[in-house]
Amino acid sequence: MPEKPDRNAIEVVNVSKIFGSGEGQVAALDTVSVSIRENEFFTLLGPSGCGKTTLLRLIAGFDFPTAGEILLYGEDIAPLPPFKRPVNTVFQSYALFPHMTVADNIGFGLEMLGKPKAEIKARVAEMLKLVKMEALAGRRTSQISGGQQQRVALARALAPQPKVLLLDEPLSALDYKLRKEMQIELKRLQHETGITFIFVTHDQEEALTMSDRIAVMSSGKILQVGSPRDIYDRPAERFVADFIGESNFLKADVVGVSGGRATVKLSSGTKIPASLPDGFSPSGKVTIVVRPEHAQLGAASPSASLSGTVENIVYLGTDTHFHLRLAGGEPFIVRRQNSRGAGDGIVQGGQIGIMIGSDAAQVLKD
Amino acid sequence: MASNFSIKHQPGFTAIAATCFVVLYLPIIVLVAYAFNAANSTSEWGGFSMRWFQSAWQNVQVIDATLRSFQIGAVAAVLSTIFATMAALATTRTAPYPGLTFKYAAINQPLMVPEIVTGVALLIFFSRIKIFTGYSGLGYLIAAHTAFCIPFAYLPIRARLENMDLTLERAAADLYATPWKTFRRITLPLLWPGILAGLMLAFVISLDDVVITEFVKSGGQDTLPTYMLGQIRRGITPEINAISTAFLLLSVAIVTLFFFVSRKRD
């Protein structure tokens, strides 16, 4: 894959959005800053009410920020109405025009831009082909299925060749299988068109599958921005670790920091290395996170990082979850991929050792 | 089984329902039947004939009043629908604010104020204007009809607007449509069935009005209903029945059309 250029398509600078006034004031966005690079698939991920949709609406122009700037290739677009922004949106409800055909829907943006008829026709044909909807060009949008409507909505938003495409949870209305297909499809479309995508979702799996980079949001703030692997392997905060994937949280004491890494002492007295969030230099008591598949099981011996009792064994086909109770009383889960063959002698109620490798633990900021 | 409660199986249900229908429709049926009476009476049957329809059709006064009714109805319906559309847009395309309910009430005022009060008020008001301007044409009747037709046009339009997905207008704006183009290309086409329904309802309401028209009209400005009222004072012939029957057919036709138009989705 070609190296992505380092130009920023969108820069959000200290943007706040406050709804209501006086006592009932709610900050939907609280001094948020983020840069979205040209040509990347960028995802805003977070639970409902975290401000991700508000940020998308500010970029689209359906709402205006209380404070801050939104730059599109360096130009402040925050005060512009939506019809003056070279940015298009795929809506959660698709919002296809019910009184127009599929082709007229796709051509609408170009028509409003005053493009010549021949150009519109060619571009609509190209878009229909891109989303594999050539056969249904003359249909009313009420006569096509949900998945097809989704494709038309995509084609309609892509047709005017926007500088940035905004996608507001577009897959949430589709069933599981179609959603999987569309995830791959969206990735393909982004690659083929080379347009910057900003995708809003509350689904961590969707975010991990499709994104080049993810911004995890909570309570009107961006907590962490990084590649899916960064976010998953090196969560900076407890919320991020908790929201994405499964996590084991352990109390630990920092005994040394050097070169972006720390040595921490676990409750068992064992010292293990742990990575640190960027620019974070902790001391004293911290929480560390270990992903269930990043820890190994072994015999209960002094060489193990931790030891505990096996409380439950859950067999899931591809892997097995071992629910453990540590000596200090905290729960701990280890996930292990299964192979064929007899069991390994781990039984419920037995004592067991847990090994935490040299690059398995991450210190959290909170 | 009697375990399911059904209003239809309560004692007296059939009798009450039948009585209601008889009271509602029997007088109309009698009226329509006597429109075809060959005799001069509206109560004694003298055989079947179309002569009263013929006589109404050739009655210059009837033709004159009918044309005037249509003229006033058409202009008032169009004007009131335009105002109602603007009012409906203004009262739905906004976040609720204090005073909005009051505006609903103000728009629907003609539904609440007794017609006779409006009639008297307009009579006094217009007579002053007549003195000042010297104008005594159909304008007064048109203005009065437009005013009381507005709520009837407003209601179906507002209902349609409230059911419309606001994201559609947002999507149009997102696709570079200016507010005016969004209105013309998205809002108006989707609102069209509501506007047509409002237009037809307003037309029928205007056609049917007696009280306000009676107060506002100048000499020689009879509409069909006020003409009929005047005729009845001089003694009734089956010609009135024939005119009523034609009027009934027209109203039923328009209301049926209204029903189909307002039922049409998308």
Image (tube, rainbow, N blue to C red):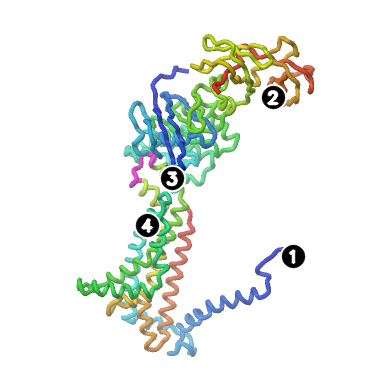
The spot of residue B119 in percent (x, y) is 35, 74
- Amino acid type, mark 2: Pro
Q: Residues in magenta?
A: B173-181
Residue at left offset 38%, top offset 87%: B233
Q: Which mark is residue B1?
A: 1
Mark 1 residue crowding within 10 angstroms, few (<14) / some (14–19) / many (20+): few
Q: Earlier in the sequence, mark 1 or mark 3?
A: 1
User: Gap between marks 4 and 3, in whole Å?
Assistant: 20 Å
Along the line of sight, the residue nearer the viewer: A345 or A109: A345
Q: Nearer the viewer, residue B138 or B200?
A: B138
In the rendered structure, are the residues bearing label 1 and label 3 in contact, judged by CB atoms less than 8 Å apart?
Answer: no
From the viewer's perspective, tell me whether residue B218 is left or right of residue A63: left
**Residues behind callouts 4 and 3 on a single chain:** yes
The residue type indicated by label 1 comes to Met
Q: How many discs mark residues in the rendered view?
A: 4
Identify the image quadrant of residue B227. Answer: bottom left
Say what amino acid the circle numbered 4 marks. Ala
Comparing B235 with B11, the one in front is: B11
The residue at which mark 4 appears reads as: B87
For disc 2, the neighbor class at 10 Å (few under 14, some 14 to 19, many from 20) is some
Q: Quadrant of residue A35?
A: top left
Q: Marks 1 and 2, Cα distance to the nearest angstrom?
A: 60 Å
The residue carrying mark 2 is A331
Q: Which residue is mark 3?
A: B168
Rounded to the nearest whole Å, what is the CA distance between mark 4 and mark 1? 52 Å
Q: Which label lies toward us, 4 or 3?
A: 4
| Residue A240 at x, y percent in the picture | 55, 26
User: Which chain contains the residue that carries disc 3?
Assistant: B
